[in-house]
Image: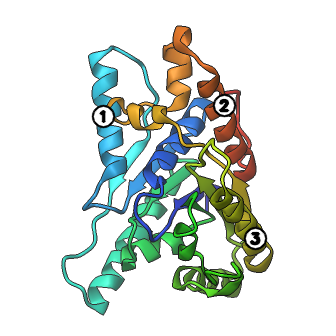
Amino acid sequence: MTNAKVIVVGNEKGGSGKSTLSIHLAVSYLYSGYKVATIDLDGRQGTLTHYIENRVRYAEENKLDLPMPEHLVVTPSQFSNKRSSEEDEEQLDEEIKDLKNDYDIIIIDTPGTFSHLSNAGHKNADILITPVNDSLVDIDVIANIDPNSKEIISESQYTQNIRDIQKKRADLGKDELFWIVLRNRISHIDAKNKREVDSILKKLQEKLGFTYISGIGERVVYREMFLKGLTILDLLKIDKDEISISHIAAKNELLTVLNTINIPLKQDI
């Protein structure tokens, strides 16, 4: 057995920033001195894979020594039946088992829709991070909310799946799944919607037992970095003359996430 940790970034809604968060976590731990592997379970969209490909190309073109994770793409079977689902799960389990022999941290990026392969990824998680956009619409992935009272009506199917995974881990004597809900793409303009999202997520934290982080701001720099495959940490090291208050704030937000995950950094990043 190894002490490798598996971090799954999961949310069954697309566009929640899972891939951007995944690459930022991977690069953060690489800069800190950990050996990191990443797995992309969203073979169709492949955002994390494209991000890393852009990173490799940009580093080569600009002769930069950027830290790189070991990256794998695991694609689901083309057949949607029970046997194929079981084979997909077995394949992923084997990939993770092999990676644990050589890497300290494994980060899994999941698709924005339910799939048996995505569910298998969640089952392997020691730490689950669910990024949620700063919108009442996106909270629906966690719970059904009354549109008038803003009270919690019921848990979502996604949350029920996490409950099942938590129970199975307990039955197997495994450590409790550490579930983090990260409020993402927060507007810098105060608004009623923004306050309501914060209030509802705090209520859900008490009811469902996840750890709530608020959060990561909406910044143009995140969209600009994709084509170069860079993260905010890379920019702070490469373009020191172009550092702004926004860059520093983004790094501090990232550090808050890392501190909450509670995998100690080996060195400052």
Q: Earlier in the sequence, mark 2 or mark 3?
A: 3
The residue that appears at 28% across and 72% down in the rendered structure is 76
From the top left corner, tell me how far across and down residue 41 is, in percent: 36, 63
Question: Regarding mark 2 in the picture, which secondary structure is present there?
Answer: helix
Q: Are the residues tagged 2 and 1 within 8 Å (C-beta)? A: no
Q: Check the image and name the residue furthest to the bottom.
A: 82
| Tag 3 residue | 205
Q: How many angstroms separate mark 2 from mark 1 (CA)? A: 25 Å
Quadrant, the N terminus: bottom right
Q: Quadrant of residue 243?
A: top right
| Tag 1 residue | 54
Would residue 248 be found to the left or right of residue 234 on screen?
right
The residue that appears at 38% across and 65% down in the rendered structure is 111
From the viewer's perspective, is residue 16 above or below residue 245?
below
Quadrant, the C terminus: top right
Q: How many angstroms separate mark 2 from mark 3 (CA)? A: 25 Å
Q: Earlier in the sequence, mark 2 or mark 1?
A: 1
Residue 210: tell me if it is visible: no
**What amino acid is found at the position of numbered circle 1 in the picture?**
Asn
Question: Regarding mark 3 in the picture, which secondary structure is present there?
Answer: helix
| Tag 2 residue | 249
**What amino acid is found at the position of numbered circle 2 in the picture?**
Ala
From the top left corner, tell me how far across and down residue 202 is, in percent: 77, 67
The residue that appears at 66% across and 63% down in the rendered structure is 197
The type of colouring in the image is rainbow
Frontmost residue, 52 versus 98: 52
